[in-house]
Amino acid sequence: MIDRATLVDYCNALLDSAAFQDYCPNGLQVEGRASISLLVTGVTASQALLDAAVAADADMLLVHHGYFWKGEPAVITGIKQRRLKTLLSNELNLLAYHLPLDVHATLGNNAQLAQLMGWSISGGLEPDNPRSVGLYGELARSMSGSELAADLARVLQREPLHIAGSDRPIKRVAWCTGAAQGYIDKAIALGADAFVTGEISEPTVHAARENGIHFFSAGHHATERYGVRALGEHLASHFGIEHRFIDMDNPV
Ligand SMILES: [Zn+2]
């Protein structure tokens, strides 16, 4: 068992969360019970995940997608009321890290995706940004677009959408987990043969075809399962608490 404040302070420091300009507050978002023995992690603090955490008698829920996003309505009605009521009436702490959990050099979503896929990391997708969210690297051996698609499907357990803007073999790959289809230009600027992210928009198809790059939409949820799970495992071993990752499937 560990007290909440110690765990939260440790996480904030580990992820350097104060250094980020983000679209939501990072760290403790909703305060619950003061001590933690069971930590549940998941990608998004949806009602289904909250209910699963309550059923498991979790003391804290740690997610990548929490609440209080910039521009969202401030009033507490509808799904927001039900979610907050679930947290508050069960004294369940909600801890959330968005960009800090994308960027962390080992536990981050992007580093974890690289590790799972066996990609080496050469640098950031934004070379001038020390907190670049995406990364790029070289494959150990070059492969075709359909080989990389098959690799993604096997590792992420989800078929990616592959836009074959080129038929050239892939050696340099750039990636950014989540909804980073707008970063395709950064991948092109780095001379990447392929760009992998979670989502796709209509203009992304044209950008891929007209710039001659392979583009893979591999799932927002599927590419962002691994950071929060890795952080949960790290916290469990660091503090000697129990951890359970609960995957609520999302096809997007
Ligand atoms: Zn995301």
Image (cartoon, helix red, strand yellow):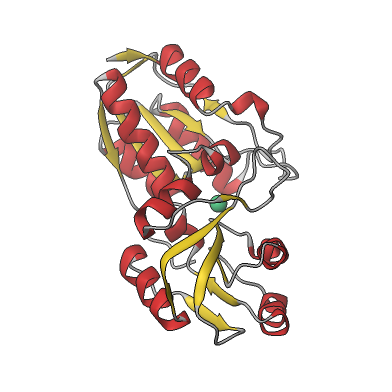
Q: Is residue 224 above or below residue 244?
A: below
User: Is residue 104 at all visible to an observer of this figure?
Assistant: yes
Q: Nearer the viewer, residue 24 or 71?
A: 24
Q: Is residue 72 above or below residue 236?
A: below
What residue is shown at x 47% (from left), y 20% (from top)? 8
Q: Nearer the viewer, residue 249 or 178?
A: 178
Q: Nearer the viewer, residue 80 or 65?
A: 65
Answer with the quarter of the image where residue 52 lies.
top left
Q: Position of residue 15 (x, y in %)?
A: 52, 29
What residue is shown at x 57% (from left), y 43% (from top)? 80
User: Is residue 225 at all visible to an observer of this figure?
Assistant: no
Q: Is residue 153 left or right of residue 175?
A: left
What residue is shown at x 39% (from left), y 48% (from top)? 226
Answer with the quarter of the image where residue 6 lies.
top left
Work out which residue is located at the far bottom of the displayed protein and give it.
167
Q: Is residue 224 left or right of residue 70?
A: left
Q: Position of residue 197 (x, y in %)?
A: 55, 63
Work out which residue is located at the far front of the displayed protein and give it.
141
Q: Position of residue 159 (x, y in %)?
A: 40, 75
Q: Quadrant of the N terminus?
A: top left
Q: Nearer the viewer, residue 87 or 216?
A: 216
What residue is shown at x 62% (from left), y 77% (from top)? 213
Q: Position of residue 24 (x, y in %)?
A: 65, 37
Q: Is residue 96 above or below residue 159?
A: above
Q: Is residue 119 left or right of residue 13?
A: left
Q: Is residue 207 above or below residue 120?
A: below
- Numbered disc total: 0
